[in-house]
Amino acid sequence: ELLLGSTRYTTAVDTWAIGCIMGEIADGQPLFPGESEIDQLFIIQKVLGPLTPAHSEMFLRNPRFLGLKFPDMTRPETLEKRYVGKLSKRAMGFMKSVLVMEPAHRRRADELLQGPYFEGLEKRDSRPSSSKRPGSSKPQEGG
């Protein structure tokens, strides 16, 4: 959405970013490399398929892309093909649930945490205790 010129920054943008980071961690290469916005948009479609109707409308209205169009993208290369042997089935499912072209269809963080990718992980309270110093088992003095 941001590449197309949207000014609406939602948590769906963050979940998309998680998928991109996950892809880069998996093989050391950016998932959607590009030398320009249009190049990056082309690569995204090459892997995930065509833009949504709303995205296409944003693209056509954006003066930076005036006169440009994309070739047919109805047969994408797919994430599975790109990461075969590099991601577990659970990791691939997670990645596919956040790298969805339609922002409203991307999984939310709370849904992701309940999903199979995090199954079996121990839940811990990540909030720091106010009575202990970080890295110490001794109570803090003073206040």
Image (cartoon, rainbow, N blue to C red):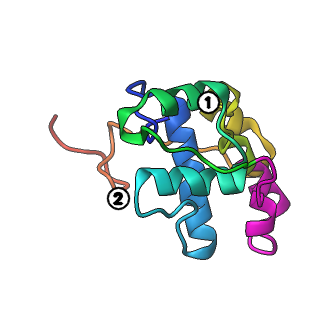
Find numbered disc 1 in the image and state the secondary structure of the residue it sits on. Answer: helix
Q: Earlier in the sequence, mark 2 or mark 1?
A: 1
Query: Which residue type does callout 2 highlight?
Result: Gly
Residue 14 among magenta residues: no
Which range of residues does the magenta coloring cover? 74-94
Residue 135: mark: 2
Q: Which residue is mark 1?
A: 103
Q: Quadrant of residue 97?
A: top right
Side of 115 relative to 33 (left or right):
right
84 shown above or below 70: below
User: In this orientation, which residue lies closer to the viewer: 78 or 136?
Assistant: 78
Residue at the (55%, 72%) spot, across then down: 29
Q: Are marks 2 and 1 in contact (CB under 8 Å)?
A: no
Side of 69 relative to 101 (left or right):
left
- Tell me the crowding category of disc 1: few under 14, some 14 to 19, or many 20 or more residues within 10 angstroms, Cα based: some
Query: Which residue type does callout 1 highlight?
Result: Pro
Q: CA distance from mark 2 to mark 1?
A: 40 Å
User: In this orientation, which residue lies closer to the viewer: 21 or 1?
Assistant: 1
The answer to whether any part of residue 32 appears in the image is yes
Q: Quadrant of the C terminus?
A: top left
Side of 109 relative to 94 (left or right):
left
Find numbered disc 2 in the image and state the secondary structure of the residue it sits on. Answer: loop
User: In this orientation, which residue lies closer to the viewer: 128 or 109?
Assistant: 109
88 shown above or below 41: below
Residue 45: mark: none
User: In this orientation, which residue lies closer to the viewer: 120 or 48?
Assistant: 48
Q: Position of residue 2 (x, y in %)?
A: 43, 37
141 shown above or below 30: above
